[in-house]
Amino acid sequence: MTLTPTVPQWKSRTSSIENVDETPKSSTSNNIDNIIESVIAQNIDYNDDETDFLEQHIETNLMWGPVTGNYLKNISLTLNDSGIHSHIYDLYQKTPYDFYKMMITNEIFQLFINEMNVYAQQEKNKNTTRRSRIQNWKDTTQEEMEKFIGCLMWMGLLQSIRDYWSKKSLYENSLKNVLPRNRFQILLKTWLFANNENANTDDRLNKISQLLTKLQQSFQAPIIPGEFICIDETLVPFKVYCGQERDPAEEHTVPSQVVLNLTKNLLNSGRTIVVDNYYTSVELAHKLLETNTYIIGTLRSNRKCNPKNILQKKLKLGQTIAEESNTGVFVEK
């Protein structure tokens, strides 16, 4: 639940007070928010005992008072450069295909090829029906896989895959010149990212873990993020599925753990992390300040360690109130 009509905005960066701009959301945005809230509600209980350990470590010595700026931590930005790596920039001709291959690398294609060929052979051994398409399987190649994924990216106009290979003039297109229909369908059926026979059952995402790791590496490699890093709420449904339980070895809650995992290579450089109210907490602010990182975000009223005076204060239109903690966190309503 968020505070209404305004949401406390806190910063561990500055003592200045700013008004929070509550711009009305569109109906589409509201619908997305409702879906996200529903997913969170089904998977995470903010009021359970999971966060009780925070009180032992934070609330004991945490004090809130008027904003003086005496406790705010001055962190210098130490980035030497940001944007696309210059050596990578010089390697490409900057065509759309170049940018595509920068993200979907040959190593990723090799993963597709290896796992598909293994899976196809496994299915071929299981299926002894003579007329089964899998019996005519031939190992795929990178050239064929690039055509296959290109077809998938191009599709979206017709309801049925078969229609793309229809001879009717209404469905005329060039896909039939790229891949035969039967070959496309068998590639689609065998497109796998992990060997089922060697699956790690302890990993919920074992079927896509290898692909995710390689995508993260290839997405991060070309670019040096700048001063401000945004972690958006649209990550929530996927995150809830893959990590809703807190690791007992970790000393922070799931939302904080998600932010710290996503930014682990970006800390200790004076950057600022911008998050929404699912992730924001005083706990996370403290953890990031320890790594010379600022955070800006809206804060839910039911989070641990919130300043009680700000939560209880009734404000008139146009009024604001702010407090600063002895640990360098600034909260405004």
Image: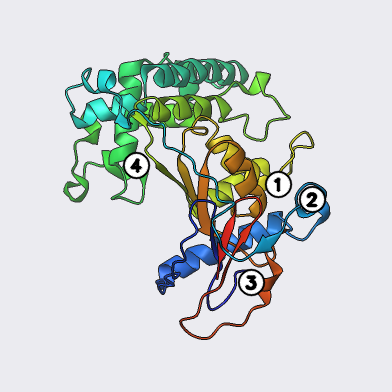
> Is 68 placed left or right of 94 in the picture?
right
Q: Are marks 2 and 1 in contact (CB under 8 Å)?
A: yes
For marks 2 and 1, the one nearer the N-term is 2
> Is 33 placed left or right of 286 in the picture?
left
Which quarter of the figure is the N terminus placed in?
A: bottom right
Residue tagged 2: 50
Q: Is residue 17 shown above or below 132? A: below
Mark 3 falls on what kind of element?
A: helix
Name the spot of residue 40 as percent of width and height, x first: 64, 57
Number of other residues with Cα within 10 Å of mark 2, as a class: few under 14, some 14 to 19, many 20 or more: some
Whole-number angstrom distance, CA of label 2 to CA of label 3? 24 Å
Mark 2 falls on what kind of element?
A: helix
Residue tagged 3: 310
Number of other residues with Cα within 10 Å of mark 3, as a class: few under 14, some 14 to 19, many 20 or more: some
Residue tagged 1: 253
Mark 1 falls on what kind of element?
A: loop
For marks 2 and 3, the one nearer the N-term is 2
